[in-house]
Image (cartoon, grey):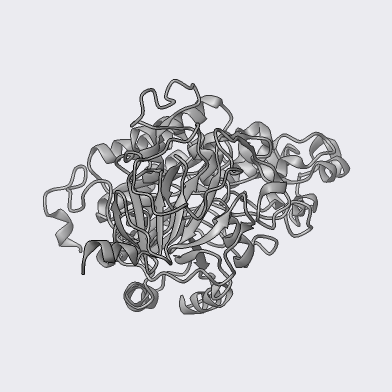
Amino acid sequence: MDPDTESRNLDLIIRNGRIVTASEVLTLGVELGVKNGKIHCIGQSLKAGPETEVVDAQGAYITPGGVDSHVHIQQDNSPTGDTWETGSRSAIAGGNTTVIAFATQKRQEESIWTALEAYHGKATGNSYCDYGFHLILTNPSETVLEAELPRLVNEEGISSIKLYMTYEPMKLGDGDLFNIMMKARSLGITTMIHAENSDMIEQITKRLAKQGNTGTFFHSIARPQLAESEATYRAISLAEVTDAPILLVHMSAPEAVRHVREAQARLLPIHAETCPHYLYLLSDRLRSGPNDFEGAKSICAPPLRHDARDLEAIWMGLAAGTFTVVSSDHAPATFDHPCGKMKGLQMPEDTEGSGGSNGGKSQRARGDFRNVPNGLPGVETRLPLLFDRTFDPARPGGGADDDKIRIPLTRFVEVTSTNPAKLYGLGGRKGSLLPGHDADIVIWHPEEPPLVAVSEADGPPSSSSENEPRGKKKITITKSVLHHRIDYTPFEGIEVRNWPRWVFLRGRRVWDRDGGGVVGEKGDGVFLKRGKSTILTGQMRRTGIGMMKGEQAYWT
């Protein structure tokens, strides 16, 4: 077929923008051509046919659709959280075209299929964006490990599991972690680990209660950085001895991050994830007066840390490459609801010593952090919050002189789209603006007077208008502008410099900030069967510290 003829058969052309990949920012004038929901070509002066939609990016940045690889949606333990409809709608409005959520095996369940079937039932037909599942494994019986996990990967297309080292209903001991890692290693599964020392937290919590210290702020005292640091080191040790790749989720403690960095320096396949709330928010947010409970809105685990230097250390780890992905850990509960955050105003059944010197009345007035559901809403704000701290390495200056700036745009794309797609078995389909990938595209607002690319005119672009916004357009995050069903945002009042203007899911426009908001439909999203995960950091088959070469072969 003649190239011009083929070009004119394109469904969509996006021109006059700066395409950002995980490695570079392309020059103005490079265009994207989309056909049948896939990126068909990247070139210059692409020719539009009579049915081609042409979008003028007006000099704005163009990035891949976000892949938020850690979201909690419509889980049984969060009855006031987002449904699949509201959570995925919020994801699209924030530039995320793919989310990966959690199906949870309950401790008493002998099989994983009950949880998976139930979760499919919740999601099917209700999502605005494409989606996948992780499995939270709590009862790793021999049948589950030997018979069901292989089917999970090969038949269900689910190539990741999450394990907890804390939370009584879900936590696993080191022996179970060891055995699961061994099986996951052989299957090419990514093992995600919530690393906190459960016993340390339990004992500190009991002692706080005896002193009457159960107000919302004491949640951050009950889960010290050392609890995360110790458990992280232990998880890395288990991964090293089993030769298994792992991902440490939602990391917040600089010392724990140091353990990861040192493991990576030894080429161990240890990946790390952090979240925007550990880059922006401090534990002061948890402080509530004697008759105030607002601090409950910021309770999450691991908790927000105390010092601005902790935030800076996480930013530095992100800039230096220690973190593989940045996810939202969207795990919301409604604030003003007796089964949501307000559950913390109900006294726990075990109140031994909990009145302290203040007595039960004062205790009830200020609430009890032990009863507050953990988690924050954040899927919609993830990309704008990170984009706000980026600079363009391809432009002179590029904004790097701003003291807020921490990472280049290429790194932004890497940790929010490209890396999560590869790590979770979606490489080649999601996370990159390359031919053959799904046409999941985010076009931001232009940040300066628009530049015009030199290209052959094919008539007026269908999305251009003299009245469209030009130049910088800052946005203040408020609950009123978001699309989840939660009655607050922990980022209330924070100003960001940009927001996704248009979002395309497989070539179809689903978000138009200045022209209707969410213009996609519930049910647009499809379940993604994923391949095996890609190791992005380190190598397997390395000899552990103090082990002989080949020593592991005696017991594997």
Residue 153, picture quadrant: bottom left
Q: Which of 307 and 517 is in front in this view?
A: 517
Note whether 138 is above or below 303 in the view shown: below
Image spot of residue 462 (x, y percent): 50, 55
Q: Residue at x 51, y 70 (%)?
A: 105
Q: Can residue 136 be seen in this view?
A: no
Q: Nearer the viewer, residue 71 or 232?
A: 71
Image spot of residue 269 (x, y percent): 27, 49
Image spot of residue 379 (x, y percent): 56, 52
Q: Which of 159 and 226 is in front in this view?
A: 159
Q: Residue at x 41, y 47 (%)?
A: 63
Image spot of residue 428 (x, y percent): 29, 60
Q: Is residue 372 visible?
A: yes
Horizontal side, residue 401 vs residue 71: left or right = left
Q: Nearer the viewer, residue 199 or 499?
A: 499
Horizontal side, residue 97 vs residue 541: left or right = right
Note whether 552 is above or below 325 in the view shown: below
Note whether 426 is above or below 32 in the view shown: below
* Placement of the N terminus among the 4 image quadrants: bottom left
